Image: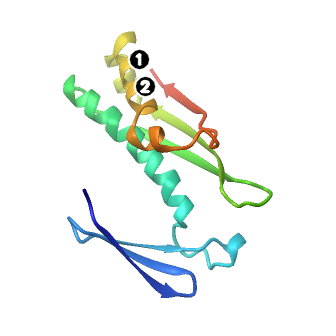
Amino acid sequence: MVDIDIEYQGDLHCRATHGPSASVLETDAPVDNHGRGETFSPTDLVATGLGSCMVTLMGIRARERELTLTGTRVHVKKHMTATPPRRIARLAVDIVVPAELATAVDGPTRELLEHAALTCPVRLSLLDAIEVPVSFDWQG
């Protein structure tokens, strides 16, 4: 269990403190929802959590095979609904694996790494109402 403490600082801005590490992050409402858009919005953090969780799980599986994912890039494009209620409608994920790694892994290892991404805890926690197309680009 992890504790996260959040303080509303006014003007649609929050400050969150991660209990175990005392790391701090801030959120702000997006411009299209009455905010200033000065930092991540809460829904941006969902997209960030998805992408970083996917590549982290891939990294765990790669490390178990004495491989590294250093340089792997993840791009998440968040789409909100156009009509109320306001919610995340789609999180399109593109994962680009560097050529050095792509040439170092065989087909079954690629499948294992992709499966790790597709079954990460954040992905499994998202409702089916959110479309999550994922593409892998093995540049090898």
Is residue 29 rendered to the left or right of residue 25?
right
The residue that disc 2 covers is 114
Q: Are marks 1 and 2 in contact (CB under 8 Å)?
A: yes
Viewer-side residue, 98 vs 9? 9
CA distance for labels 1 and 2: 5 Å
User: Where residue 128 appears, x then y in whole percent?
Assistant: 60, 38
- Identified by mark 2, the residue type is Glu
Please give the name of the residue rendered at 40% of the width and 47% of the height, measured from the top-left corner.
52
User: Where residue 129 appears, x then y in whole percent?
Assistant: 64, 42
User: Where residue 123 appears, x then y in whole percent?
Assistant: 47, 39
> Residue 30 occupies which quadrant of the picture?
bottom right
Is residue 38 rendered to the left or right of residue 17?
right
Is residue 1 rendered to the left or right of residue 140?
left
Quadrant of the rendering where the C terminus is positioned:
top left
User: Where residue 119 appears, x then y in whole percent?
Assistant: 42, 31
**Dot 2: within a 10 Å radius of its alpha carbon, few (fewer than 14), some, or many (20 or more) residues?**
many
Q: Is mark 2 on a helix, strand or loop?
A: helix
Viewer-side residue, 109 vs 70? 109
The residue that disc 1 covers is 111
Instruction: Name the residue furthest right.
Output: 83
Q: In this view, does 8 lie above or below 84?
A: below
Viewer-side residue, 2 vs 26? 2
State whether residue 42 appears in this view. yes
Instruction: Name the residue furthest top.
Output: 107
Please give the name of the residue rendered at 50% of the width and 54% of the height, measured from the top-left corner.
46
Quadrant of the rendering where the N terminus is positioned:
bottom left
Q: In this view, does 56 lie above or below 62?
A: below
